[in-house]
Image (spheres, rainbow, N blue to C red):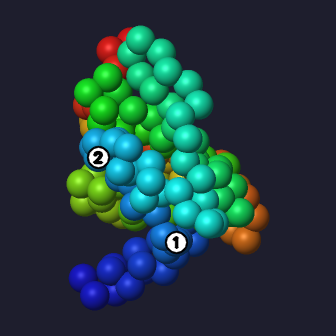
Amino acid sequence: MKKLLILISLCASVTITNSAFGISLGDIITDNTIKAETTPATTMQLIKQNSDHSEYQIAKSSGRITVLVNTKGQVYGFEWSDKSPNLNSMLGVYKAEFDVAYAKRENKYNHRILTIDTPDLLVQQFGLPGGEMQGSMYAKDLQPAQ
């Protein structure tokens, strides 16, 4: 078990980085959230509002993250083009589900592409370590009806 945890930790370090980011799937977005995410290094602003969801964009020096919010104000997804996306922070309460699926994924050796698809979570990411990563993450149970 110890060897498995070390292996998961080593593999996760390629795609999951630690940077300051405080919004997770399921969080409620308020004016206070926007103020907290707007710092000298980052800005968060509303960029799109539809009848079924809103989109906020967080611009950072390393890239951008789009935060997708349902009509209840809950974060149901993220889309990013960022050199250092923090999947750990974005996953929030879905982290345990992600970790189980990550350990069971079929292609454990391709660190340029990551796909996790569970009943409640979809995560897709591609790119090269050290370069910009492209990806998306959706909590299926929080998404607007399609």
**Rendering coords of residue 68 (x, y %):** 45, 34
Q: Is residue 41 left or right of residue 3?
A: right
The residue that appears at 60% across and 59% down in the rendered structure is 42
* Looking at the image, residue 27 lies above or below residue 47: below
Q: Pick the quarter of the image with the C terminus.
A: top left
- In front of the other: 72 or 87: 72
Q: Quadrant of residue 96?
A: bottom left
Q: How many marks?
A: 2
Residue shown at the point (52%, 72%) measured from the top left: 19
Query: What's the mark number on residue 57?
Result: none
In the rendered structure, which amino acid carries the disc numbered 2?
Asp
At mark 1, the secondary structure is: loop
**Residue at image point 31% right, 32% down:** 73
Expressed as whole percent of the image width and height from the top left, the position of residue 79 reads 55, 41
User: Going from the N terminus, do you reach mark 2 or mark 1 first?
Assistant: 1
Q: Is residue 109 above or below residue 138?
A: below
Residue carrying label 2? 27
Placement of the N terminus among the 4 image quadrants: bottom left
Q: Position of residue 5 (x, y in %)?
A: 33, 80
Q: Residue furthest right?
A: 131
Residue 111 visible in this rendered orientation of the protein: no
The picture places residue 119, in percent across and down from the top left corner, at 27, 35
7 above or below 127? below
**Which numbered tag is attached to residue 19?**
1
What is the spatial separation of the Cα atoms under label 2 and label 1, in whole angstroms? Answer: 18 Å
Residue ID at (69%, 55%)? 63
Look at the numbered disc 2 and give the secondary structure of its residue.
loop
Label 1: few (<14), some (14–19) or many (≥20) C-alpha neighbours in 10 Å? few
Task: From the viewer's perspective, tell me whether residue 132 is left or right of residue 89.
Answer: right
Which image quadrant for residue 143? top left
Kind of residue indicated by mark 1: Ser
Task: Assess disc 2: are there few (<14), some (14-19) or many (≥20) residues with their C-alpha within 10 Å of its C-alpha.
Answer: some
